[in-house]
Image (tube, grey):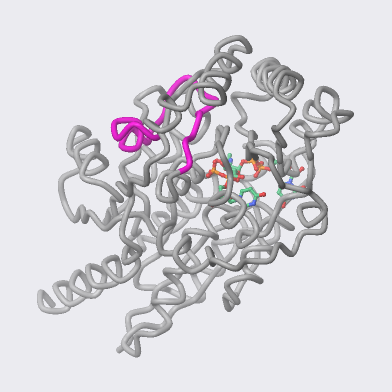
Amino acid sequence: MKLKVMSVFGTRPEAIKMCPLVKELEKHEEIESIVCLTGQHREMLQQVIDIFGTKVTYNLDIMQPRQTLTTITTSVLEKIEPILQKEKPDVVLVHGDTSTSFVAALAAFYQQIPVGHVEAGLRTFDKYSPFPEEMNRSLTGRIAELHFAPTENNRKNLLQENITNHIFVTGNTVIDAFQTTVKPEYQYKDEDVQKIDFTGKRCILMTAHRRENLGQPLENICKAVKRIVEEFPDIEVIYPVHMNPAVRDTATAILGDMDRVHLIKPLDVEDMHNLMSRSFLVMTDSGGLQEEAPSCGVPVLVLRTETERPEAVEAGTVKVVGVEEAVIYENAKLLLTNQAEYDKMAKAVNPYGDGHASERIIKHLIEWSDSLQNKE
Ligand code: UD1
Ligand code: UDP
């Protein structure tokens, strides 16, 4: 009998980190792999599915404009139940800390199906920051049977919560993805990026979308970036703006009429990774960018008050600068004007993996399944 694995995901970052794993699952004859998308994201999810050519069996297609946490939760819970009952997978794989991850894990639990948590054990230990991700991942960790932790530090976080069984340190599958997308002679597909003349310029790649940063913090971030662009004539800021209207409204209001700030549509992951690897600096509140940029030696200023990814901070390539305008501005200015400070941060470090996380996850999955059969 084949091991039936259902991978459930629904947002852009989950897709970027789960598609390499799905591809690897499909190589195994002893595994039947099914993919169920929740569709918490629509266009931003489809972009990733298209790039990886992932075969999708189900799409719950739940996204609504300006959706709330409650609507995501109730829609996924209701729509996934009949699929779990029909498919009866041996294990459901979920990823990280989105509402999709937590709700899919809960739905699997209701059917008494074991859950494997990919990217397990990240914590800030602050219930409200990031919101609602910290609670999503803690609750998913409580439900999960198998915990695929990217780093040793993530494993320790789980032990601290008395989660002690079936923790496997595997690296992060984001590095598996990154190693397939970045290419030396890459040509951008996005027309807005193609049009930018980078000659003699330094590029700041920026993203910001977190729920707790909406409103005043995002205004502060945009104002700091505006000051930097006004002061440094060789800076081009590229900001692929998240499709959340609450993000777009603020970004456009503050940065919309600046010549050297490019507010562009979300980039597909190949364009994004290649642009990142050629950037001078990354400024972001995203989780994924904190993992990717260090591996290509690009410094990262984190536009948040905390991070659940301390590894690259400890290595010196990522700095958490908060959400106050003056502090963000001063930190960016320092890196733009002080070569020694820049060089200290611009070194390639890779605490998040070696590009083989998916293989390790599958090895542990198969061993776990074999151990269950031996008990029968
Ligand atoms: C979600 C995750 C967050 C993750 C982020 C990655 C939750 C609660 N939040 O936040 O952890 O970091 O994804 O990007 O799970 N929209 C579109 N098209 C899309 C995607 C989004 O129009 O393809 C718009 C819709 O109006 C939607 C809104 O963005 O209602 C917000 O999307 P949602 O998934 O609720 O929140 P994110 O901020 O994307
Ligand atoms: N990303 C992308 N296009 C963009 C912005 C981000 O492909 O326009 C990628 C980025 O490289 C990373 C992931 O999306 O792999 C991060 O997703 P996001 O910032 O939406 O979520 P988070 O990681 O904060 O949960």
Quadrant of the frame with the N terminus: bottom left
Residue 137 lies, in percent from the top left, at 40, 41
Residue 183, quarter of the rendered image: bottom right
Relative to 36, residue 225 above or below: above
Residue at x 45% of width, y 72% of height: 22
Relative to 146, residue 254 above or below: above
Residue 242, quarter of the rendered image: top right
Residue at x 79% of width, y 40% of height: 262
Residue at x 71% of width, y 41% of height: 238
The one of 34 and 258 positioned closer to us in this rendering: 258
The reply, left or right, for residue 311 in relation to residue 80 is: left
The reply, left or right, for residue 57 in relation to residue 165 is: right
Relative to 352, residue 5 above or below: below
Relative to 161, residue 45 above or below: below
Residue 233 lies, in percent from the top left, at 74, 27
Quadrant of the frame with the C terminus: bottom left
The reply, left or right, for residue 198 in relation to residue 120 is: right
Q: Going by the picture, which residue comes out furthest to the right?
A: 257
> Quick check: is 370 in the magenta stretch?
no
Q: Going by the picture, which residue comes out furthest to the left?
A: 375
Q: Going by the picture, which residue comes out furthest to the front?
A: 200
Highlighted magenta segment, given as a residue range: 298-317
Residue at x 52% of width, y 63% of height: 182
> Quick check: is 309 in the magenta stretch?
yes
Residue 5 lies, in percent from the top left, at 40, 73
The one of 101 and 337 positioned closer to us in this rendering: 337
